[in-house]
Image (spheres, rainbow, N blue to C red):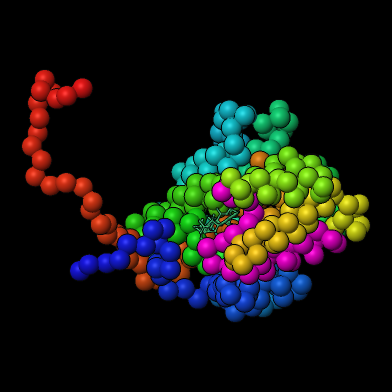
Amino acid sequence: MPHDFMPGLAGVPAAKSAISDVDGSRGILEYRGIRVEELCAKSTFLETSYLLLFGRLPSAPELSRWTQDITRHRRLKYSIVDLLKCLPEQGHPMDALQAAVAALGMYYPGRNVKDADNNYWSAVRLVAKLPTIVAAWARLRHGDDAVPPRDDLDLSENFFYMLTETVPPPLWGEIFDDCLILHAEHTMNASTFTGLVTASTLADPYTVIASSIGALKGPLHGGANEEVVQMLKEIGSPERAGDYVRGKLAAKQKLMGFGHRVYKVKDPRATVLQSLCQRLFGECGSSPLYDVALAVERTAGELLAGKPIYPNVDFYSGIIYDKMAIDTDLFTPLFAMARVSGWLAHWLEQLRENKLFRPDQIYSGEHNRTYVPLSQRQS
Ligand code: ACO
């Protein structure tokens, strides 16, 4: 049967899903039918994670059990910490995260993906341990010891504690938690699709998440948040933003943190992140990067008028993390810490009606060529 070739599978549905939905023309993102703005205002990352994974908001006892299960499974085995210590300290944190997550699958029973109980505990371990791996790597690579989690702190506060050995100001915890909510899920995208392809072979969930982490790393996907901050630092001041944007567009180069395959208006997550920037800088002093970002957005708006290219989720998130003194190369791992909930929700959903991914191709090569012996080939 002939098919149209859609480069990048643009517009081709790869799954039926009830997890999240994007209205790209109106700038609406919902998780299980609830808008992300409302979740940021009223929920927590762990509650949102439950919503994504299990399809509805938890009751009070369900939330308490979920929180307790996550809290109890944050710790890393010594040998996972030892494994991280063996990796080159100049390596990218996404590579360390991917290696550690793949290794988790050698310690925990995840292979029987037909066992719902097993799958629950795999999901718990992955949501719980990713922040611990990211924080451990951030310290070990500088020669510091990993800091074990503290059970009296919530997920976001504990992450900062494991990173710096200090409990962050309450506002930082709240804002960071909102950032995790905003990054937790986003319909079908490169990393989710990658995970689902791996999952369709009935591979264990640690391998599934390791695959997704690999896809998220690229600069056209989650890796863009790092490049945005590098770009803003390179521009240096709002006065230089105009020339920079003009130069980029004249050279037909892309502005990092702008554009989206689905959103044809401003990404609603960028709008929430911008209001989080304002809250954070209102309390903790302004960030020069934010002023540069506003100037870039303004100039890009003028120069790209008529083209549906606006800031995406990666444009303002790095400015928040930078203000919280988080290393730039940890930004994409933070994205993974949040998105693991969405990836796992898609994994569980697909398992209910799994079918091995085996797409087609349009062959564009030759047929019936003869084998030329090596001695007769032209150099
Ligand atoms: N800056 C300038 N122009 C852009 C940008 C941008 N960031 N994004 C798209 N365009 C232009 C293209 O040059 C192209 O113009 P043309 O039609 O005149 O040739 C047109 O818009 C279409 O661009 P495509 O790359 O074909 O569109 P696609 O849907 O594939 O783009 C993508 C989506 C890959 C995200 C793109 O916008 C991009 O590369 N952005 C920068 C990287 C980035 O911020 N990635 C993070 C995305 S969000 C996420 O993954 C979490």
Q: Position of residue 283 (x, y in %)?
A: 91, 57
Nearer to the camera, 280 or 67: 280
Number of callouts in the render? 0
Which part of the image, by quadrant, shows the C terminus? Answer: top left
Where is ligand 1, by quadrant?
bottom right
In magenta, the rendered stretch is 252-279
Query: Left of 42 or right of it: where is 111?
Result: left
**Quadrant of the image occupied by residue 327:** top right
Q: Is residue 262 magenta?
A: yes
Residue sitting at x 35%, y 67%: 354
Query: Left of 87 or right of it: where is 135?
Result: right
Seen in the picture, residue 144 relative to 178 is either above or below; the reply is above
Residue sitting at x 32%, y 62%: 5
Q: Position of residue 289 (x, y in %)?
A: 80, 48
Q: Is residue 52 magenta?
A: no
Which part of the image, by quadrant, shows the N terminus? Answer: bottom left
Q: Position of residue 117 (x, y in %)?
A: 48, 64
Residue sitting at x 62%, y 77%: 26
Query: Left of 193 or right of it: where is 79?
Result: right
